[in-house]
């Protein structure tokens, strides 16, 4: 009996040792595969996305369209195609600050109306459908109207003076991508009357209908 037991142990012990060593090696292999080092090696690199938020962004733009003279301005010059410069700042989801600079000279029979203005206002988006957003806007500005007109049979040029005024408008924007926006805009400008020393006041208003393109940065 003892001899048989020794024979069994002789063959069993090496098998147990081999199995135990294999099991330990397998555990080490699994542990290494699931370690932080291996996890870091196979962890995917997620690229940082660019900030595409429409808020707190600056835009510069250019507009081209027709300027229609009204009141006394229309008696001294013809309507014509003009261009404007714009600056836009997106302050919130509903409201933008917008600034507009324009200057044009309109001639008629040796007379003219020259209009120059820096209009500052708030643009309020009425709603937004996808990248399309209609808006209304209004504000105040600084204007410098100048005329050359026939007074008592003589052509007289008015003195250049700075005056205050207001503007109202409406339009729609279509955002093409993160950088470019196109749109249309209709704006009414009314500079306050400018008093003159020895001639009638310079007074009038005008209306602009424009297509715009903005670059956002």
Image (cartoon, rainbow, N blue to C red):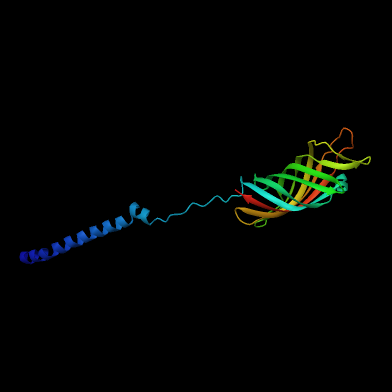
Residue visible at 32% across and 57% down? 33
Q: Is residue 48 left or right of residue 38?
A: right
Residue 201 seen: yes
Q: Total number of numbered labels?
A: 0
Q: Is residue 97 left or right of residue 107?
A: left
Residue visible at 69% across and 47% down? 86
Give the percent coordinates (x, y) of residue 68.
Answer: 82, 51
Give the percent coordinates (x, y) of residue 91.
Answer: 65, 44
Residue visible at 73% across and 41% down? 118
Of all residues, the one furthest to the top in this rendering is 197
Residue closest to the eye, 151 or 116: 151
Q: Is residue 4 above or below residue 102?
A: below
Q: Is residue 196 left or right of residue 171?
A: right
Of all residues, the one furthest to the right in this rendering is 152
Residue 133 seen: no
Give the percent coordinates (x, y) of residue 163.
Answer: 79, 37
Give the percent coordinates (x, y) of residue 30.
Answer: 30, 58
Residue closest to the eye, 84 or 217: 84
- For the N terminus, the image quarter is bottom left
Q: Is residue 43 left or right of residue 145?
A: left
Residue closest to the eye, 121 or 19: 121
* Quadrant of residue 21 within the rendered picture: bottom left
Residue closest to the eye, 21 or 96: 96
């Amino acid at each position: 009996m003892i001899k048989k037991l020794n024979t069994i142990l002789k063959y069993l012990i090496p098998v147990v040792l081999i199995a135990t060593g294999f099991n330990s090696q397998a555990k080490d292999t699994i542990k290494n595969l699931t370690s932080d080092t291996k996890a870091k090696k196979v962890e995917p690199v997620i690229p940082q996305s660019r900030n595409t938020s429409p808020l707190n962004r600056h835009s510069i733009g250019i507009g081209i369209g027709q300027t229609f003279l009204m009141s006394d301005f229309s008696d001294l010059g013809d309507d014509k195609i003009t261009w404007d410069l714009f600056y836009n700042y997106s302050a919130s989801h509903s409201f933008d600050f917008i600034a507009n600079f324009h200057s044009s000279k309109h001639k008629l029979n040796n007379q003219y109306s020259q209009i120059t203005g820096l209009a500052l206002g708030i643009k309020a988006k009425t709603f937004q459908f996808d990248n399309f957003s209609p808006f209304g806007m209004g504000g105040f500005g600084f204007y410098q109207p100048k005329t050359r007109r026939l007074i008592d049979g003589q052509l007289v040029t008015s003195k250049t003076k700075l005056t205050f005024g207001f503007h109202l408008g409406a339009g729609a924007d279509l955002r093409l991508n993160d950088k470019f926006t196109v749109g249309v805009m209709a704006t009414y400008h009314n500079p306050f009357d400018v008093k003159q020393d020895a001639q009638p006041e310079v007074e009038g208003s005008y209306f602009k209908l424009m297509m715009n393109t903005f670059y956002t940065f």
